[in-house]
Image (cartoon, coloured by chain):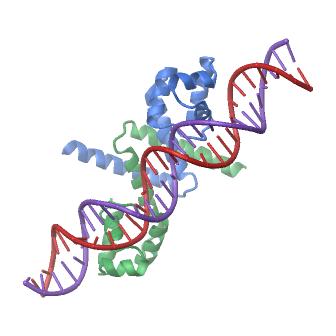
Chain colours: A green, B blue, C purple, D red
Amino acid sequence: MKTLGETLKCAREEKAMILRKVAAEVDIDQSLISKFEKNERKPTMEQIVRLAKFYELPENELIINWYSEKIADELKYTESTSEILKVAEEKINYYKAQENGK
Amino acid sequence: MKTLGETLKCAREEKAMILRKVAAEVDIDQSLISKFEKNERKPTMEQIVRLAKFYELPENELIINWYSEKIADELKYTESTSEILKVAEEKINYYKAQENGK
DNA sequence: TACATTTGGACAATATTTGTCTAAAACAAT
DNA sequence: ATTGTTTTAGACAAATATTGTCCAAATGTA
């Protein structure tokens, strides 16, 4: 299971590009991209989309990674996490059912 | 499955108290408490703890509700939610294993 | 050593969340 | 209906958190 940062870094290495170049192409500060790769900063959704496009990575995978890391981060030091996730899923399903029914 | 707001409101009604009184007791603006009950605002953790104590509710249940609602909110308009939650759980377990091993 | 790339850290800029206040809405009781 | 009470909505300031930017230090490499 790769982190979002690892995924981005691998993608860049695949393309054999240096940060400065990528930064110029996707118009994001190179220092920021470095931090993304080291999981020190979280890209915004827009940045994710641009990076996915640029690296030709499946956007959906990055997004799944992005959200799951966000959630993992929130629950990292919390107890009852599996219970929390279970309840969260129920609530989401409930919301979504509401949406469809209306 | 009750929302956090519903739980709080029920607890207050059990005790037959008006907002103004609760507000004074737990030292939180009554308007805020009203919003908590209507799920328009999310209490801080500290507020949760104080309310749980005051209403004599199991703190852990409120916390589970709090986190799960937060997550549900984040994923409400997102796709692949069950995938996201699954990956999130894996990551959490991974983090926690790290913690123990160190 | 000299050069290129990556990284860390400080700080300003933005965005998000929170608390507070006030008045309007809703509800009762008479 | 009017009065009195409770709840709620909305606007706004205050406090927090997140983000973008810059530059210098660290790292790597020939």
Residue A2 in percent (x, y) is at 32, 61
Give the left or right position of residue A23, taking residue B64 as reference: left
Residue A89 in percent (x, y) is at 51, 45
Q: Nearer the viewer, residue C11 or A61?
A: C11
What's the residue at 41%, 60% (across, down)?
Answer: A65
Q: Nearer the viewer, residue B36 or B5?
A: B36
User: Quick check: C19 above or below A74?
Assistant: above
What's the residue at 45%, 43% (across, down)?
Answer: A85
Q: Nearer the viewer, residue B72 or B43?
A: B43
The answer to whether any part of residue B1 appears in the image is no
User: Quick check: A56 above or below A45?
Assistant: below
Q: How many marks?
A: 0
Q: Pick the quarter of the image with the N terminus of chain A.
A: bottom left
Residue B84 in percent (x, y) is at 46, 54
Give the left or right position of residue A94, taking residue C23 as reference: left
Residue C28 in percent (x, y) is at 79, 19
Q: Nearer the viewer, residue B3 or B52?
A: B52
User: Quick check: A102 above or below A21?
Assistant: above
Give the left or right position of residue A2, taking residue B22 as reference: left
The answer to whether any part of residue B72 appears in the image is yes
What's the residue at 56%, 26% (across, down)?
Answer: B23
